[in-house]
Amino acid sequence: MGVGGQERRPALRVYATGGTIASRRDAATGAVAAVADVGELLGRVPGLAGVADLSLESVATVNGWNVTPALMLDLARRVDAGLADPTIAGAVVTHGTDTAEETALLLDLLVGSSKPVVLAVALRHLDDIGSDGPRNLLDAARVAVAPGARDRGALLVANETIHAARHVTKVHTTNPAAFASPGVGPAGSVDGGTVRFHHPPPLRQRIDAERIEPAVFLFKPCVGDDDRPLRWALEAGYRGIVVEGSGAGNVPSGVVPGIAAALAAGVPVVLCSRCVAGPLAATYGGGGAAGGGHDLARLGVIPAHGLTAQKARVKLMVALGACGSVDRVRALFDAT
C-alpha cells in the first residue's frame, strides 16, 4: 500500500525513440518530423498518472525509417537493464510506425525479462486534429501494467489493439488502424481502458546474442530477375541473405545459381514469402518449375517459418550475432 493507505501504482520505464508519436509540423515548411521530447509527449496524456509511476529515458529522436540496427540493439540493452530493476514492472517504448515491427521483434528475441515490453506508436502527429499518439501511449501503459501481459515478449499497441511482435506488420500507410497480425489475429484489445487478451501467452524464443550482424542483404526477386544482386551481395561481404520469394516460396530460375553460391560460401540464405499469410511449401521444382520451393529446400535454404522479409532479416542479424554456422542459424529459425 502507498501513503495514506492508497494503492501504490506500478512503476514503468518509458524509452523514447521518436516517431510520429513524437512529431510536430513545422509551421514554416509544412514538414513533419520527430522533434517533441518525451516530457512534452507525456504531458499530452494526463491519464498516465493514474496508471503508473513513470521514469523516462530518451534513447533517440528519429522517425521510424531512420532507425538503425545499432539503435535497436542499444534500445534492447537499455530495456534489458531497466527491467532487471525489481521496482520496474514493465517498459513502454515510443517508436515510429515504419520499422516498429522490426524493433519489436528484436526486443522480443533479445530482452531476457518476462516483464512486459510494449511499443506505442502513432499514425497522426501531435499537431494533427486526430492525433492518435496520446491514446496509444495511454493504452500501452495500461497493457504494460496488466498481469496478463507478462511472458508475452514484446507487444505493439495501436488503435485499441494489442499485437504480438512475431506476427504484427504494418498494412496501411496512414490509417490509425495500420497494424494487423495476418493469419493469427491480434493478441488482445484495450476496451474502455480494460486490457483483454484473446489467447494464452505463446511459447517465446529468446536468443542470447552479445551483438547482431547488420550485414544482411534482403532480395525480393520479381518476374525475370536473375542472381546479379546476390552475386553483388557476396562480393560486398554480406554475411547473410534473406530472399522474399513468391507464393509458397519460389524464385525465378535465374536466381537459383546465386543462392547456391551463397550457401556454398557458408552464407545462410533464409527464404520467406511475399504473401501476407500462409506457410512455405517445398512443392515445385525441376524442368519448367525450376526455382520452386522443392529445388530451394534441396539446396539448403532456411525457411523463415512465417516471418515477413523484414523480420526474417532482423532475426538473421540476431542469429548471426549469436553464432556463425549455417547449421546453428537453421536451428535457431527452426526453434520458432
Image: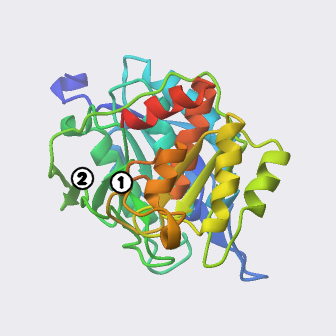
Residue 241 point in image, percent of width and height: 64, 48
As drawn, the label of residue 187 is 2
**What kind of element bears circle 1?**
loop
Q: Is residue 186 visible?
A: yes
Report whether 30 appears left or right of 86: right
Identity of the residue drawn at 70% across and 57% down: 66
Type of residue at label 2?
Ala
Type of residue at label 1?
His
As drawn, the label of residue 167 is 1
**Label 2 CA crowd tier, 10 Å (few <14, some 14–19, many 20+):** many
C-alpha span from label 2 to label 1: 9 Å
Q: Is residue 68 visible?
A: no
Q: Is residue 279 above or below residue 78?
A: below
**What kind of element bears circle 2?**
loop
Q: Is residue 244 above or below residue 83?
A: below
Residue 197 point in image, percent of width and height: 17, 49
Q: Is residue 94 above or below residue 127?
A: above
Query: Camera-side residue: 48 or 325?
Result: 325
**Label 1 CA crowd tier, 10 Å (few <14, some 14–19, many 20+):** many
Residue 277 point in image, percent of width and height: 34, 65
Identity of the residue drawn at 55% across and 55% down: 310
- The quarter in which the C terminus is drawn is top left
Identity of the residue drawn at 15% across and 47% down: 199
Residue 83 point in image, percent of width and height: 43, 24
Query: Camera-side residue: 187 or 262?
Result: 262
Q: Answer whether labels 2 and 1 touch (C-beta < 8 Å).
A: yes
Q: Earlier in the sequence, mark 2 or mark 1?
A: 1
Identity of the residue drawn at 24% across and 52% down: 187
